[in-house]
Amino acid sequence: MTVRSLAAADSGISTMQTAIDTIGNNVANASTDGYKSTTAQFEDVLTEQLTPASAPSAGLASTNPSSIGAGAQLAGMETNFSEGAIVQTGVPTDSAIQGNGFYVVNQGGNTFYTRSGSFQLDVNGVLSTVNGGVVQGWAGASPTTGPTGPLTIPSNLTISPQETTNIDMSGNIPSGGTAFTTTATLYDAQGNQVPLTLTYTPTGTANQWNMQATVNGQKLFASGVTMNFNASGQLASYAVDGGATTPVTGQSSIATTQAMPTGFQWNETKMNFVFPAPTSSQAVTQYTTSQTVGVANQDGYTQGALQSWSIGQNGVITGTFTNGQSQQLGTIALANFTNPGGLENLGNLDYQSTSASGQPQVGVPGANGSGTLLGGALEQSNVDLASQLTNLVEAQTNYEADTKVISTTQTVLQALVTNA
């Protein structure tokens, strides 16, 4: 009996040492971004059944079985994948997962999964982890249904110029006003600025104006666009170069009728002046209020260089260029698992799928049960120091109790030998 108590106490010391080791590792990683705390789970060791159970019989009641164990052993390590606190860092390469999911990382031909979004760009502009793992996703605006691959953001990335083809109009023409002009800047195929002048002239007919567009004195219409407004101040119809009148029932696109202005480089043969639908918030109107009509927007721009980039909630990496344009540079992939607890912890904040975790379900953030991303932020460790220190005290107490069992057993054995 006393020998059994020695083995049981020894196993208790071993399990409590494992518990203390686990707690120590958790405490050590309390400030490790993306770290997930672990808990050692134990079970008893049953070695001998002393008496079996018996059914009731004549004159006797049933008896319960009795057995005695030989101590405790490690049943497994449980990882707590609950979300840690998220803190803003302002670093564009940082990203935090809000909810379930793991980043997909390829390192040395092996696929790993991690919650740590502390990324960086390597010398080739490849988005990677601090350990050299290549973050996986879909490059550019590629469909997110295809295979994943590296995400590259070159520092010297540029966007080519685009010539103006559509000119959006908006604003108010003052009722009863006199002729006036507005200006805007357009762009040719090489990104050169093209100075546009719009001249608005009352025709003498009530609620009727003529608009002529010129570039360095070169007309874009033969005689201009005649605009007719109704009593409510909304654009009711128009006529191009004195031609047939076209009623306005929605958005109107009016193409230029003259050759593109010389002195510039053009791929297209015309431009379109787009008038929003009447009564819409951007509609061209004729009220007694002040003059605000002009070019609200145009789709041309000069060449631009990458100025900054950011990670959106849907994992889309958007680049902003010096010409004011933005472009999708890629999409970060997330993987989700039926049983995250079945992942194998490889260290370095990396996990590997196993038969227990199930196959990864890879998709864009927000799909397949995955969470969304928060760019410029990091997920902190989910270690609860208060709980860990409480568990440490409990493990220490149990450890000391097991050593007490050993010392007591030793005393009993010594007494047995002395009295033998």
Image: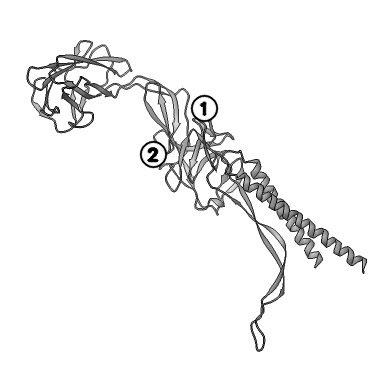
Question: Against 53, is 1 above or below?
Answer: above
Residue at 33%, 18% (x, y): give it: 191
Percent position (x, y) of residue 261? 22, 14
Amino acid type, label 2: Pro
| Residue 242 point in image, percent of width and height | 8, 20
Q: Under tag 2, what secondary structure? A: loop
Q: Quadrant of residue 231?
A: top left
Residue 17 locus on image (x, y percent):
72, 51
Disc 1: CA contacts within 10 A as few (<14), some (14-19) or many (>=20):
few
Q: Secondary structure at mark 1?
A: loop
User: Which quadrant: the N terminus?
Assistant: bottom right
Name which of mark 1 and mark 2 comes first in the sequence. Answer: 1
| Closer to us: 150 or 283 | 283
Q: Residue at x 14, y 27 (%)?
A: 233
Q: Amino acid at mark 1?
A: Asn
- Left-right relation of 146 to 121: left
Q: Is residue 187 above or below residue 147?
A: above
As drawn, is 9 to the left or to the right of 321? right
Residue 145 lies left or right of residue 235; in this view the side is right
Q: Is residue 386 above or below residue 280?
A: below
- Which residue is painted at 66% across and 88% down in the image? 59
- Residues at discs 1 and 2 in contact (Cβ within 8 Å): no
Report the residue marked by disc 1: 124
Q: As rendered, which of 354 and 168 lies closer to the eye?
A: 168
Q: Is residue 252 above or below residue 410?
A: above
Q: Position of residue 278 (x, y in %)?
A: 17, 31
* Residue named by callout 2: 143
- Give the distance between the C-alpha atoms of the residues marked 1 and 2, in whole angstroms: 23 Å
How many residues crowd mark 2 within 10 Å: few (<14), some (14–19), many (20+)?
Answer: few
**Rendered image quadrant of residue 315:** top left
